[in-house]
Image (cartoon, grey):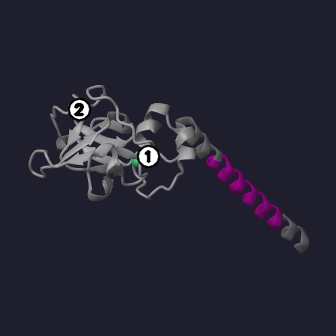
Amino acid sequence: MKKLSEILIITIIYFTTFLIVSGYKIQEAGTMMMNQQSGNPYYSHTDTSVLNVPDSVWKKILPADVYAVAREKATEPAFTGKYTDFNGIGTYYCAVCGNRLFRSDAKFASTCGWPSFFEPARKNSVIYESDNSYGMYRIEVLCGRCGSHLGHVFDDGPPPTGKRFCMNSIVLDFVPDDSTSVK
Ligand SMILES: [Zn+2]
């Protein structure tokens, strides 16, 4: 009799473990499918961990025009970007990784032909690098999370910072404040 109850307990433990493991696997498969649907497993509005993804991987994930600016430092032609004359109230995220970059209240009307901001959303939103290309000395602005090229920063911006973050629209994702979508 004792043996029978032991067998019964072992059987219950075995099946419980089996159910937990298969449940976990189903959940994991669901998460993978979600990532595959969005096509970019690195994109997040909440994860601030620094990414070190090689260009060969980004090339497979990103649309060609985003890749050209973000990873090959191309510049979109002046006055062609979707956010140049855009005045929506909300947040601009990195179109490559979803990192929070700028708030709309730091955006100002600039005549330069690209969306311009006087400060990033937070200190670590962006990083800077010296850029001596095209015979000019400029300061390049890169995403603080994925290292993608965003644009340049100049010293002819308005108060309070005097900075002009001159950005390419194509590497920005705007989300309005009244948006109900959670990413
Ligand atoms: Zn990024």
- Tell me if label 1 and label 2 are in contact, CB under 8 Å: no
Q: Residue at x 40, y 45 (%)?
A: 98
Residue 63 at x, y percent in the picture: 49, 33
Q: Residue at x 47, y 38 (%)?
A: 67
Q: Tell me where the magenta segment starts and ends, as one range.
A: 9-28
Q: Which mark is residue 123?
A: none
Check disc 2 and give the amino acid type. Gly
Residue 15 at x, y percent in the picture: 78, 57
Question: Quarter of the image containing the C terminus?
Answer: top left
Q: Secondary structure at mark 1?
A: loop
The relative height of residue 78 versus residue 182 in the rendered view (above or below) is: above
Q: Quadrant of residue 83?
A: top left
Foreground mark, 1 or 2, reads: 1
The relative height of residue 166 versus residue 146 in the rendered view (above or below) is: above
Measure the alpha-carbon separation of dots 1 and 2: 21 Å
Q: Which residue is mark 2?
A: 88
Dot 1 or dot 2: first in sequence order is: 2
Q: Residues within 10 Å of mark 2 (few under 14, many from 20)?
A: some
Q: Nearer the viewer, residue 179 or 57?
A: 57
Q: Nearer the viewer, residue 126 or 182?
A: 126
Q: Nearer the viewer, residue 66 or 156?
A: 156
Label 1 CB-ligand 1 distance < 8 A: yes
Q: Which residue is mark 1?
A: 97
> Mainly helix, strand or loop, the magenta region?
helix
In the displayed orientation, state which residue is furthest to the bottom: 2
